Amino acid sequence: MRILIIEPDRKLATVLEKSFKQAGFAVQLAHDGQTAVSKADDQRPNAVLCELALPGQNGVAFLQEFRSYQDWLDVPVFVYSQIPCEDTGLSARGWHKLGVHKYLYKPTTRLKDLHYAINQSLTNYETA
Amino acid sequence: MTAEGFSDTTVRALAHELKYPLVEIARHAELIADKQAAGEIQSTAEQTLRLIDSYLLCAQAEYGQLALEPVTAGSALYDVSMRLRNIEMPIVIDDRAHAPVMTHSGALTACLELCARTLVSSVGVTSVRLKSFNDRSGRIGIGVLVDANIQQDDFTQAIMRAGKSHMPLARVASRGQVSLTVADTLSKAIGSSLQVKKLGKLHGFITYLPKSEQMALF
């Protein structure tokens, strides 16, 4: 299982990379949207974990671009963000349209909960 | 932009900025081999993160930006218990109301958490009870009670001085004074106010909220 992690905070990115590798994932790491697109182009990820506060292009714009590519339409996306969901201005329907499976708020989501949410969501997605 | 406006914007931006290093600390702690030390670091960082979120909610509340919605008392109490899981003492949920209230979920849970932490840091309590009940006027009381023999006057003074003093619980608390003021502001933002309550041998803070007729139909 390959996960593309888009995390601008380099220290946190390293923590996420290490924890997902320990959990058995192959990890692709990007610190901004453009690098993420080129990494996904190199090797198609099975899932994407994305912060919304990205340098240059914000996370929603990145997700819109990501979804505009036919090849990646069915790649599950998980938002793991510093921004509370209610502050984004997007409704549940809006996130659903962007193919976001789960919105996880960083300050309250521990790594083990993050792994659990992603594994459970991916299992349900594959069996559906 | 006025000086006051600039100050508010800066403080809010600073609060958001502080979340970055704290998330780094909290998540990094999860990878440390010494689980006990890691747990301590993690819980301190997470508690600080929630404190920052409470202050941000408080700032939003002062601009009247909190939208009320139906929330069941039981789920609010459960959320508070999860936020308090690092206090290392029994937390009892006593949901007698079994009903939805009109509130802002984040503000209510933050308010109750701040009250509980202030009480825990104030006196030597051995357990925390999170309680909801129906009162005679048809509202629902939700609050935090502790098993400590605290003078009623301490709390009365604290509430009277909340928002006016930096140390409303000065006689009993070494910390958490600002927290109580924030809790009181959040309580007001959801259409209530913190009240001192003595139920049997327990003392604490209760906020009274209107029932949600909308959700009660279901």
Image (spheres, grey):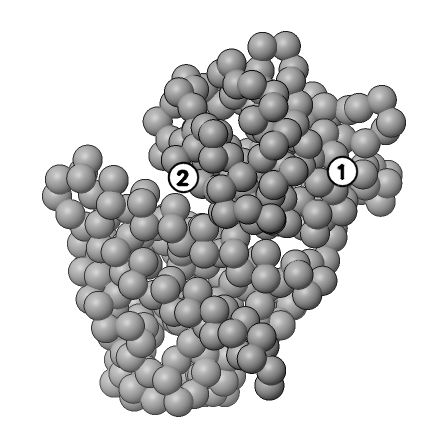
Taking the spot 81% from the left edge, 37% from the top edge, the residue there is B211
Q: Residue at x 59, y 56 (%)?
A: B58
Q: Is residue A99 above or below residue B82?
A: below
The image quarter containing residue B25 is bottom left
B63 lies left or right of B41: right
Disc 1 marks a residue whose amino acid type is: Leu
Q: Are there few (<14), some (14-19), or many (20+) residues within 10 Å of tag 2?
A: some
Q: Report the quarter where the N terminus of chain A lies.
A: bottom left
Q: Secondary structure at mark 1?
A: strand
Going from N to C along the chain, the mark reached first, 1 or 2, is 2
**Image location (x, y in percent) of residue B177:** 48, 42
Residue located beneath label 2 in the image: B175
Asked whether A10 or B108 is in front, the reply is: B108
What percent of the width, then of the height, locates residue A88? 57, 71
Mark 1 sits on what residue? B209
Q: Chain letter of disc 2?
A: B
- Vertical arrangement, residue B217 with respect to residue B5, above or below: above
Q: Nearer the viewer, mark 1 or mark 2?
A: 2
**Which image quadrant for residue B196?**
top right
The answer as to whether the residues below labels 1 and 2 share one chain is yes
